[in-house]
Image (cartoon, rainbow, N blue to C red):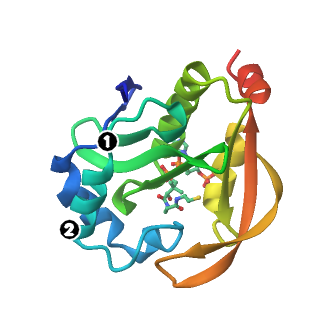
Amino acid sequence: MTPSLLTSRLILRPPQLGDADALALYLNDFEVSGNLARVPYPYLRSDAVAWLGSQRPRPAAEETSFAIELAGVGYVGHIGYQKVGEVPVIGYWLGKPFWGRGIMTEAAIAAIDWFFEASDASDIYSGVFHFNQPSLAIQKRLGFTETGHSTLLCLARGVELEHIDTKLARSVWKARRQ
Ligand SMILES: CC(C)(COP(=O)(O)OP(=O)(O)OC[C@H]1O[C@@H](n2cnc3c(N)ncnc32)[C@H](O)[C@@H]1OP(=O)(O)O)[C@@H](O)C(=O)NCCC(=O)NCCS
């Protein structure tokens, strides 16, 4: 069951069908989808409804998804885990009107704290397309380190792109949060 996590400005909660309009509005923006692997562009309301319909509560922390709600605004983005092979991978995006206010950093701290409590995994994996320096900077500030490069399909761009792979060790996170 996906819990709800409270931070000073945000609620991280299970995604719901009522998020479809906002989800479609913010993801139908190439500046958002063009930085993500599995989001098509254009992104229609029907894509949002189909994706939300597939988001069932899952028992594993490695497959948990959170809608991000900003106080006084509502749904503004998403952060979640998926299992790729055997490892947990974190992904995230925020609607463009809300960039640059520390919102994703705040959401990520809550989602990572929760994950390391809920799972016994030793690492969280992530990464960015090679041009996404803002997101890489956020990950590095959180304690992620680069582990190498790979290639990954970007659906919105319809091409395979160079991807910088990263990882956050539980030990690094614990040391930072003390
Ligand atoms: C990447 C993304 C999630 C960043 O979200 P964000 O909420 O703007 O990120 P943050 O605000 O936490 O951090 C960005 C900047 O705000 C600054 N910031 C942090 N706390 C802040 C606060 N309380 N008030 C104002 N600014 C703050 C950070 O220092 C950072 O600045 P810098 O990078 O210029 O040094 C967002 O741009 C996005 O969704 N992009 C498209 C999709 C994407 O790239 N997803 C990630 C794929 S790997």
Q: Is residue 134 left or right of residue 99?
A: right
Q: Which residue is mark 1?
A: 56
Crowd class of label 2 (few under 14; some 14 to 19; many from 20; radius 10 Å): some
Please, which residue is most extreme toward the right here? 148
* Residue 53 visible in rendering: yes
Front: mark 2 or 1: 1
Q: Does 162 sit left or right of 80 as displayed?
A: right
Q: Quadrant of residue 59?
A: top left
Name the quarter where the N terminus is drawn: top left
The relative height of residue 178 versus residue 115 in the rendered view (above or below) is above
Residue named by callout 2: 45
Query: Hey, what amino acid is under mark 2?
Result: Arg
Report x, y in % for residue 10.
36, 33
Rendered image: mark on residue 95: none
Of the numbered discs 2 and 1, the one sitting upstream in the chain is 2
Which of the two residues, 70 or 22, is positioned nearer the viewer here? 22
The residue drawn where x is 51% and y is 83% is 157
